[in-house]
Image: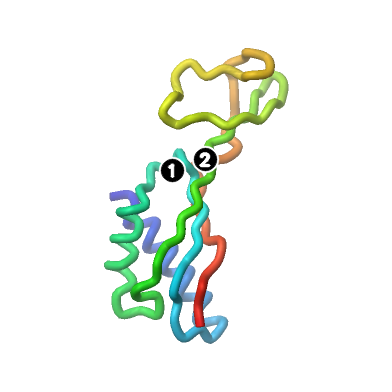
Amino acid sequence: MHELPVMQSILSIVVRHAALHHVKKVHAIGLSVGSLSDLEEEWMQKYFDHLSAGTIAEGARLKVEWVPAVLSCEACGEHFAIDKTRLDGISCPACGQKKFSLVSGREYHIKDMEAE
């Protein structure tokens, strides 16, 4: 259910930008979503459809590009992608250390819109 506030935020941004650029209809919205965000594409579209009813974005399709989870090793600086289904026992492939910071994987943002 955490998709609901995310979709409310995205719809608000889309409607605001559409008004600024005199858009008549939004057909699609390109999104970048981190693979660790716990957002589900099916529910994102369902909530967006519900929230956008009666707006300029009604019927718009969400085009989701999944961004991989990337960590940065705090020991050597190596950046490496991880599989979100295998989070236990992660170590740096370059030096073997186990202390990291997250570079990407939790974000979501609007990339573009298809509109007329």
Outermost residue on the top side: it is 96
Locate residue 93, reporting x and y percent. 63, 19
Where 43 falls versus 84 (above or below)? Answer: below
First in sequence: mark 1 vs mark 2: 1
Q: Residue at x 71, y 26 (%)?
A: 77
| Label of residue 37 in the image | 1
Scheme of colours in the image: rainbow
| Label of residue 94 in the image | none
Element carrying mark 1: loop
Q: Which residue is mark 2?
A: 105
Instruction: Kindly identify the amino acid type of the residue bearing the numbered disc 1.
Output: Ser
96 on left or right of 88: right
Question: How many numbered tags mark residues here?
Answer: 2
Q: Residue at x 55, y 81 (%)?
A: 20
- Name the residue nearer the viewer: 79 or 114: 114
Q: CA distance from mark 1 to mark 2?
A: 7 Å
Element carrying mark 2: loop
Instruction: Kindly identify the amino acid type of the residue bearing the numbered disc 2.
Output: Gly
Locate residue 3, reporting x and y percent. 34, 53
Locate residue 61, reporting x and y percent. 40, 66
Locate residue 46, reporting x and y percent. 29, 60
Where 54 falls versus 34 (above or below)? Answer: below
Classify mark 1: residues with Cα within 10 Å, few (<14), some (14-19) or many (20+).
some
Cβ–Cβ under 8 Å for marks 1 and 2 = yes
Q: Residue at x 41, y 28 (%)?
A: 85
Where 9 falls versus 55 (above or below)? Answer: above
